[in-house]
Amino acid sequence: MSTKNSESLFARSKAVSPGGVHSPVRAFKSVGGTPVFFERSEGAHLWSVEGKQYIDFCQAFGPMLLGHRDPEVAAAVHKIVDQAWSLGACEPFSLELAEFLTSRVKCLETVRFVSSGTEAVMSALRVARGATGRNKILKFDGCYHGHVDSMLVKAGSGLAGEVAADSAGVSNAQETLVAPLDDEAAVEAIFKARGAEIAGVILEPLPANYGLIIQRKEFILKVMELAKQAGALVIFDEVISGFRVHPEGMAGILGVKPDLVTYGKIVGGGFPLGAFGGRRDLMDFVAPQGPVYQAGTLSANPVSVTAGITTLKKVERENVIEKTNQKTEDFARAVNAKFSEAGFPWQVISFGSLFWIHPKTDRPIRRLSDIPAVHREGFPKFFHAALELGVYLAPSAFEVGFISYAHTDEILKLAVDRLGQAAQKALA
Ligand SMILES: Cc1ncc(COP(=O)(O)O)c(C=O)c1O
């Protein structure tokens, strides 16, 4: 047990867990090499078991808007741990978070807490089916909605047709229709052919799971209009964008009210928590109020909801979203200048406090087919150059980067320099 290095820990992990991990991207499969094992986090930093410090832009894939182990959140968590863990009964802690959320987010009339984004999506889809009495769900090519069976369907597999599952073990892929992003005509064709069967259309209003594929507002409005005409519900999956890009997520930025919305990540302040909610009349279908069953032993556990409410109150009080968005814009501009200086033909795009590094394109990437083919093969070299220089990016060409409130100007300046050096190394 004395071998404290990532290589030996990964070897041991592979013997006891599939692929050595508990969530696939962590295995470094698409970037190659051995995953770094981390044992400490604070603010914008991670420390590996070897004792090396990294500037972290993965930020646990999104929950840590305040950075790792924010002192205020840590204090609240320590306090609640001394008071109540899971109660499996009514308690005031989740009530406070539910009141906070429903008073801040206009489309959220009522809310139910679950333990992950996946659960939130699974439950919202069930509500959509239960409320409409229809079966099909329309999703978009390249949008990820957690590992809900019916959402694991092949991207880009045709328009109105039923598609094959992306994962083995999925039996209900035929319930899902897939449309390409950024293509009003394709969505219109699907609604024309199958509209009466569609219970709901689910989308990441800011697609951020296949790179950052920022959509035109008109496209999203058109999708919402087509759904409404067909009597289908609109579900915004704001698991990543919620409470990050704007206090009301993309719904707030777009100024729209989806029928249902799903959250995860930031809502639990880094602890397991998800939420789904929306129109009261739809949420009234949920048990025990209505016939759509949904439950959870650990749902709304006091530790997660305390971390969530403490995080969101600080975010509101210190105007964290606006400040972090601005820092991200400045960071992207500075990295792009370094890339140009180095003659590295890649770019950083950003939205809110999210960014994505990809080969330069002369127009914005709006569809999966716009992503340059060299991206997949080119990214690992840049990733490993950055890693060696102490910058931890998410270990996949198609994961976005996250900037937190704890990324100070000084840390970001250092990161910009290191990413410039990584660009030079990747070119060499
Ligand atoms: C948009 C979106 N929806 C749903 C999920 C699933 O959330 P979780 O991993 O908490 O189950 C994710 C996870 O990354 C996500 O990005």
Image: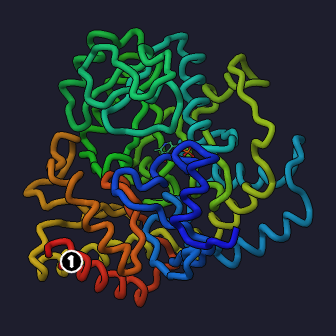
Q: Secondary structure at mark 1?
A: helix
**Residue under the image location 73 percent in, 73 percent down:** 74
**269 left or right, relative to 287:** left
Residue closer to the observer: 322 or 268: 268
Residue closer to the observer: 170 or 75: 170
Residue lying furthest bottom: 410
**Residue under the image location 78 percent in, 67 percent down:** 77
**Residue under the image location 41 percent in, 43 percent down:** 256
> Can the viewer see residue 233 in this picture?
no
**220 left or right, relative to 22:** left
* Quadrant holding the N terminus: bottom right
Residue 211 percent coordinates (x, y)? 31, 51
Q: Is residue 264 above or below residue 351?
A: above
Residue 366 percent coordinates (x, y)? 21, 45
- Report crowding for label 1: few under 14, some 14 to 19, many 20 or more residues within 10 A (C-alpha): some
Residue 167 percent coordinates (x, y)? 44, 28
**2 left or right, relative to 211:** right
Q: How many marks?
A: 1
* Quadrant holding the C terminus: bottom left
Q: Does mark 1 have its CB less than 8 Å from ligand 1?
A: no
Residue located beneath label 1 in the image: 425
Q: Is residue 2 above or below residue 236?
A: below
Amino acid at the residue labelled 1: Lys
User: Would you identify the image quadrant in which residue 224 lies?
Assistant: top left
Q: Is residue 366 above or below residue 426?
A: above
**Residue under the image location 41 percent in, 20 percent down:** 176
